[in-house]
Amino acid sequence: MNSGREVSDGRLTVEGFSVAARAFADKWKIHNQSFPPWSWVPLINRTLHLSNQEEGYLSLEEILILSSLEESPEDESLNVATDCLEKEESVDHTILVQNQENEAHYYDFHIVYSSSYKVPVLYFRGYCSGGQPLSLDVIKKDLPSCSVSLLHESKWTFITQEEHPYLNRPWFKLHPCGTEDWIKLLSQSSISTGCQMPVDLYLVSWFSVVGQVVGLRIPLEMLN
Amino acid sequence: MSEKETSPTILQFAPLNSSVDEGFWHSFSSLKLDKLGIDDSPIPITGFYGPCSHPQVSNHLTLLSESLPLDEQSSVASTSHGNRNKCPVPGILYNTNTLESFDKLDKQSLLKAEANKIWDDIQSGKALEDPAVLSRFLVISFADLKKWSFRYWFAFPALVLDPPASLVELKPASEYFSSEEAESVSAACNEWRNSDLTTDVPFFLVSVSSDSKASIRHLKDWEACQGDHHKLLFGFYDPCHLPNNPGWPLRNYLALIRARWSLETVWFFCYRESRGFADLNLSLVGQASVTLASGESAETVPNSVGWELNKGKRVPRSISLANSMDPTRLAVSAVDLNLKLMRWRALPSLDLNVLSSVKCLLLGAGTLGCQVARTLMGWGIRNITFVDYGKVAMSNPVRQSLYTFEDCVGGEFKAVAAVKSLKQIFPAMESSGVVMAIPMPGHPISSQEEDSVLADCKRLSELIESHDAVFLLTDTRESRWLPSLLCANANKIAINAALGFDSYMVMRHGAGPTSLSDDMQNLDMNKTNKQRLGCYFCNDVVAPQDSMTDRTLDQQCTVTRPGLAPIAGALAVELLVGVLQHPLGINAKGDNSSSSNGGNNDDSPLGILPHQIRSSVSQFSQITLLGQASNSCTACSETVISEYRERGNSFLLEAINHPTYLEDLTGLTELKKAANSFNLDWEDDDTDDEDVAVHM
């Protein structure tokens, strides 16, 4: 395994991932200011590592998408009386009565390193303002149409629901088994110095493909 | 006190909204299950909020998994102070153990108790030291940890001003400040927000000097700010985005200001952001007019309001997290994912729906039955019925993979123990067991037993009718006869597996004789029979070269090399899956491993679909065989099936009681007599209808 500055087989070491992640986050901050920046979440090492490598993942949270009212979150049919506060005092005029607004959907994205596939993996989830998780059907409605068609046509992209490796809850993820192959294709076609890709650019190149599936585009300047 | 009809209007506050992250419920469930048990004393929790960050959407007061008292298990570093979007706010959680006690909670007094705490903090000065306590909140909940659903209700206690405050004016901050002042205010706010020490302090003073220099100060510095300013505003992080209303935190803020400093006119600053920076267009500056009621002592606690509305109604909220927390559902989606991955990566044309809906009947729950069941589960097949009349014996668990030592000691019936075992492996299995013996031909019964034996026949017939695929996994030849006949009659897929000491045979029966269309039945019977693959009993006549092999398998053989049952059982399942995936299903023709011209390769994504597989582990060899159906078959021939259909029970009784009845009926007796009178030179005999192709 190449622990140096280049990636030639489409895969990353865990150290390479840390380096690539910081480079990616920095470039994003500079070139992609329409979005909040990615933050690095370090993991508490439970085992003793000889190297002082910090393991962690990249996190981009609370991306807001306003959707129309038709998809109101499923509230359990509450078999309760229409007014549970009989002893409450009469209506307080200082409280503004609000109309039902557009439903806000929030999305969290994590870029996590997979040690079994040796590539990064994009995990994501959606939820409404009250905190209820969104199903994949609802999420697909929020995606731009080009993303949806990409999902259907491409053989490289496949959304699955699996347990988040650190948060112990089901998140959606783009399955990584094709990643190694198409990264190799990318590095062959773009870099002039043979088939190698500098580690710094790994996540940027990777995200230029993967981000499109979830509707996150990156500006071309980031690829330089 | 008369209300003026003209302005100023009553100050209306936008309610605060709650948001509970899924992680909070996960952490709370663990806490309840691991530590608290039935203890329902109130739990101190921390809520988080920040200023509004989007012009169209208000921010919420959020509960996260770190809202609960510290949990050592987390592998992710918990949020420390200094997170700009997570100002910590103290709260309290009352969780009840039943829905009834949830409904019976005295909401008024709970709200009052929290409001009292706020009032006390105002009176004592604590609110000046740590202003976040002004936004103290309360949650009541009922967590149903069997259904993974949570009912909850937030209250944001607000001290009611009597008479209510009125609004003199309200406008965007950019219109209130001069451009120089605005620039300075923005800069000061950004600095306040960027410092770890102050970013999570949600209430502050904005002091603007006469030369347009703004500074942000802590509330406790109020006295020090006097006289020093041109403008002094009471600033706070406002989660609300609305242009004409301030957010909820202003309510208790005004109560504080009135109580501590007795001001009648209050200039307030609703601080809101966008893209992480102060946004003075979105932020508001307003002037409120507060009446200092005379005769009111400091000890009189004002009334309080604050229960959160749910879509305008005064009812609690609820959320179901069964999909992400119920372990059975998680197991189901994990298993489904595995199968989908197989389809996506290797077999795009795999039909998973047919597998999840097929109903399998396993006759025999011994070494073969256990292996078949386990392999069926691996393919995502959920519906399995066992038929076996035996009990788990001491020698069984080592070879019969569904049983354990406890089953022997308890003297469990195999059919019952197998069902239990499947459920323990995968809770979503739909499995049942039938303790019943299979009636066998040539084993005469007394007249008293007739009724119960016929009842068993009927039961078996009903079981076969109600399933899609039948596995013949018993340990005698005779016990396979009735199931073979019934499967041929009902045209059900039958997979047969049999073990010798060091050999095994796995085969699929052909379609039943009446499965052919009427048109075809008008044709020469000889020809049409050639279309059907044979069953286990067709071999009796059809493959004379293999009679030695057959006899070995036919003997009641309880001693076999242990490796065989897993292999044969697994092959039996792979054969079934091949049939299910084939467009012609039970009518698929048989392939051999040597067939090169297409065969079933083109039709089935899984490869060839043989008729019979035979193997000898002493040679580590395996061959595929092909046998057509026989006209004289005692189980599946036209003769026998029509006789069964015409005479039903009397036919069955004759077959059971008279050892030679079936062979007489089918003409086998005749045939054997004729065969014995010839020299054994089968090649020349072309009156044979029972042509068979045997490929090695």
Image (cartoon, grey):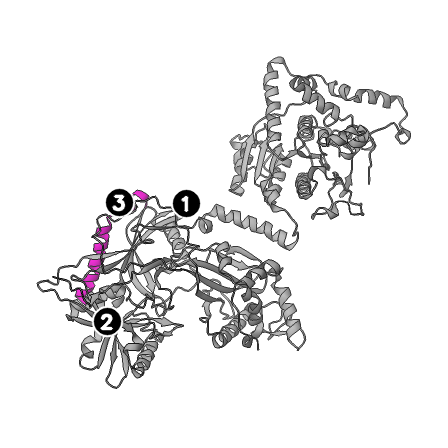
Q: Residues within 10 Å of mark 2 (few under 14, many from 20)?
A: some
Instruction: Report the quarter where the C terminus of chain B lies.
Output: top right
Residue A86 seen by the camera: yes
Disc on the earlier residue, 1 or 2: 1
Q: Marks 2 and 3: which is nearer the front?
A: 2
Q: Secondary structure at mark 2?
A: strand
The reply to whether callout 2 and callout 3 are in contact (CB within 8 Å) is no
From the viewer's perspective, is residue B111 above or below residue B4? Answer: above
- The residue that mark 1 highlights is B147
Which of disc 1 and disc 3 is earlier in sequence?
3
Query: Which residue matches tag 2?
Result: B169
Instruction: Tell me the residue at 68%/32% (across/down).
Output: B491
Q: Position of residue A95 (x, y in %)?
A: 25, 59
> In front of the other: label 1 or label 2?
2
Task: Name the residue type under label 3.
Answer: Lys
Camera-side residue of B396 and B463: B463
Q: Whole-percent x and y of residue B358?
A: 60, 39
Q: What secondary structure is marked by label 1?
A: loop
The part of the chain drawn in magenta is B97-126
Where A74 sits versus B682, above or below?
A: below
